[in-house]
Amino acid sequence: MFPLRILITEDDHVSALLLKKALEKNNHHIIGISDSGEKALEILEKHTADIVMMDINLSGELDGIKTTEIINEKYDIPVVYLSASSDSETLTKVVGTNPSAYVIKPFNIRELNMVIELAIFKDRKEKELQKLNNELEEKVKQRTKDLHEANKELTRALEKEREIGELKSRIVLNVSHGFKTPLTSILSSAQLLQVYAEKEHPFKAKITKHANKIESSVRSLNGLLTSVLFFGKADANKIDYNPKKMYLTSFFQEIVDVVRAGAENDVRVTLEIGKIPRSMVTDVDLMYQVFENLLSNAVKYSKDGQQVNFKVWAEGNFIVAEVKDQGIGIPKKEQEQLFDRFFRAKNVGIIEGSGLGLSIVKKCVEVLKGDISFVSDAGKGTTFHVKVPINRE
C-alpha cells in the first residue's frame, strides 16, 4: 500500500503513540496527533491529510462524531472510527456520519492496514460515483433544448443512477458484513485463547475449538478478499488465460477432498468419473475456481443427511461436469439474477455468503470459452452443468 498522510485523533496518549508507531512502520506519515476535536480541526487547517483515525470519545466540547461531521462538511476526508465499543447505540450514532470504516479496539496492524486500505478504496469509489453523477446531470442539462430527447436522456440517466446506487449499497452491505463477522470472531476467540492457554489440560478442548474458529474465520475473510480482487481484475480486463498441463482424475479428486474437509454440515459428496483423458492443457486456477465454488455451494445449501453428486465425463472435445444437490434450490422468479454479483436468493436464510461465488464461476467459464447452465426448483435442489473445451481453439 502506498504511503498516506494520517491525522491521529486519540485522547489516550499511550494508545496514540502505539498507533503512530504501527502506522509509521508501514511508511505512513503522521501529520499530527490530537487529543480533542478542536485540536484536530486546527491541524487540518494547516496540513493536508489523506485519512483521519478518529476516537469516538474525546476530551473537549467536540466528541469524535461531531468532529467527523465537521470534517465531512469542510474537508471531505475519509474518517476511520476507533472505539472499544461495538454496542448498537454506538453504531447507530456513527452511521449518520457515513464513516469510511469502524475499528474495534484492540486491533492488530494487519487488521488496521486492511481497514485503512478499504477506507481509501471506498472514498475513491464514492468520489468517482459522484463525478459520474455530475457528468450525467450535465448531459441532461445540455439536451433540454429538445424536449423529447431530453426526457429520454433523463430517463436513462435516472435508471443508471439507480443501478449505481443499488450496486453501491450491495457492495457496502456485503463487504461490511463479510468483514465484520469474521473479524469479530477472530478477536473474541483470540482473547479467549489467551485466557485458556494459561490453564492446564482441562481447557485443551476449548483451546482447540477456538483455534478452529480463528482458522475458519480467516479462511472466510481471505475468500472474500480474493473474490473482490478477482472482480477488480475482471473489470480491468486483466484476467489472463494461463494454460498448464493438468491430470484430470487427481484434480477432481483433490477438489472433492478439499470440499469435504471444509464442510460444516453432514452432507455426503460423491464423485463419479467417466471416460476422460488422462490429462489436458488448460488454466488450472480458473478450473479450480469453477468446480470448488460449485461444489462448496452445493454442500453449503444442503441439509444434514443429504447428498451432493459430482459427475465428470468427456463429450467430443469437451469435459462435461454435473454438480447435483438436494438442497434448498432457487426460486423461479430469482433464477435470472443467479450469476449477478452480490445476488443472494431470498430463501438462503441465515446461511452466510457474499453472493460472489457464482459470478466468479460464470466469469471463469467465459474465459475458458466454456458453457454453464442449471436447472433448479425451490426446496428440491439444483443441478449445474459445465462444459469446458479439452483443446481450446
Image: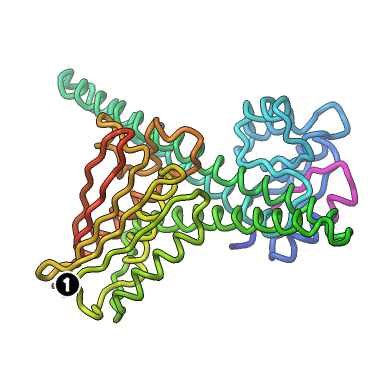
Q: Is residue 295 above or below residue 144?
A: below
The N terminus - image quarter: bottom right
Based on the picture, tell me whether residue 6 belongs to the magenta stretch. Answer: yes
Q: Residues within 10 Å of mark 1 (few under 14, many from 20)?
A: few
Classify residue 366 by image quadrant: bottom left
Q: Is residue 320 left or right of residue 117?
A: left
Q: Which residue is mark 1?
A: 392
Q: Is residue 44 magenta?
A: no
Q: Position of residue 276 (x, y in %)?
A: 20, 73
Q: Residue at 47% x, 58% y: name it.
A: 226
Farthest residue toward the top?
Answer: 147
- The local secondary structure at tag 1 comes to loop
Residue at 16% x, 24% y is 149
Highlighted magenta segment, given as a residue range: 4-17
Kind of residue at disc 1? Arg
Say which residue appears at 66% left-offset and 55% top-offset: 214
Residue 134 in sight in this render = no
Locate residue 335, reporting x and y percent. Answer: 26, 36
Judge from the rendering whether residue 95 lies leftward or rightward of residue 387; answer left or right.
right
* Residue at position x 24%, y 37% in the image: 336
Residue 64, by quadrant, is top right
In what quadrant of the picture does the C terminus appear?
bottom left
Give the image location of residue 36, x and y in percent: 84, 37
